[in-house]
Structure formats: C-alpha cells, structure tokens
Image (spheres, helix red, strand yellow):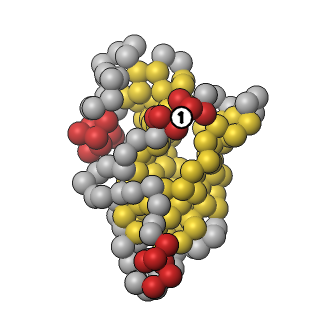
Amino acid sequence: MIRRLAIALVVGMLGLAVSPDVSLAAEKAGSAAKVGKVQLQMLVVHATTAHSNVDPKLSGLMKYLSPFKYTGFDLLNTHTATLGSNDGASFSIVGGRDVELTLLSTDEKAVRVRVQINQEQRGKLLDTTIRVNRNGSFIVAGPKHKEGVLVLPVTAKY
C-alpha cells in the first residue's frame, strides 16, 4: 500500500512550480523573510470511473485532475486550518483515515508542509514533506476509496 501511495504522490500543480522539498542551502542562507500564519486548505476529492459527474465546486481544478484516468470527481469535504511554523492540524477523512498537516517552515515564496496519512487498521500510509508555492497547491493522491481513489489538493494561502 505504501508503494502505491508513493507512486500516486502527484506532481505539484495549479500553475506554480512545486517541488518535494526546499533546498537546504537556500534555507541556511536565509534567502527570504519568514512569514507568520498560513492558511492551509485541504480538499477531499473522490476520483472514480463509476460515473462521469464532476462536482461544480471542482471546476477550477479540472485541468489538473483531468490527466488522471478517472472520469468522475466528487468533492467529499473541505478542511481549513490557519497555522504558524511547527503548528499542525489533523483531519478525519473517509475510510477511517486521518490526515495530519504540519507547517514546517515558511518564507515569502513557499511553505514546507509535512503530510501524514494514517488508517486505523493499517497504521501509517504516507509520511512525506511537500513544498507549496505561495497561493499554490500540491496534489496528493492514492488512498483507495470505493471504486476509485482519494485526491487531496493542499493549498497554502498567505
């Protein structure tokens, strides 16, 4: 399961360059001033081939979701937290899973966020660090759900 999740960790999207981690050299050089609070928003989207309906609230994301092999996209939930550096928020999602987002660092250009997905029966499914550009998003996908998968776009607004 972990291998499938690692494979399903999708490239950061939504028009802004996103990489899995921040260069240590740039951090050590203090290339940008730290930012205070950051609003992290995580959508919970069920991608499926069981139908071809698309939730109207996802219309702005469809150009990034359409490369997936799925035809239907249902918005199941939206979670939002305003976090400072090293603050975390945990959200329960379908399938007995919990997602924990921890804001590791911020600067004027991007944030580093630790994403952990745990499931009651299976334990830790994913533990990774992502870099999300200011007002950009990164899409994590892969946990199976019904006739498809869950897609979790994480957006950093500040």
Disc 1: CA contacts within 10 A as few (<14), some (14-19) or many (>=20): some
Apparent side of residue 108 relative to residue 127 in the rendered image (left or right): left
Rendered-image quadrant of the N terminus: top right
- Disc 1 designates what residue? 5
Q: In the image, residue 2 lies at what x, y percent?
A: 60, 33
Say which element carries label 1: helix
Count of residue discs? 1
Which residue is more in the foreground, 140 or 30?
Answer: 30
Residue 40 can be seen, yes or no: no
Residue 158 lies, with reference to residue 10, above or below; the image says: below
Residue visible at 39% across and 57% down?
Answer: 19
- Which amino acid is tagged 1? Leu
Residue visible at 36% across and 73% down?
Answer: 109
Residue 48 lies, with reference to residue 98, above or below; the image says: above
Residue visible at 36% across and 57% down?
Answer: 18
In which image quadrant can residue 57 be found? Answer: top left
In which image quadrant can residue 122 be found? Answer: top right
Residue visible at 36% across and 67% down?
Answer: 134
Residue 127 lies, with reference to residue 120, above or below; the image says: below
Residue 100 can be seen, yes or no: yes
Q: Residue furthest front?
A: 25
Apparent side of residue 56 relative to residue 39 in the rendered image (left or right): left
Apparent side of residue 134 relative to residue 21 in the rendered image (left or right): left
Rendered-image quadrant of the C terminus: bottom left
Q: In the image, residue 105 lies at what x, y percent?
A: 53, 72
Q: In the image, residue 17 lies at what x, y percent?
A: 30, 58
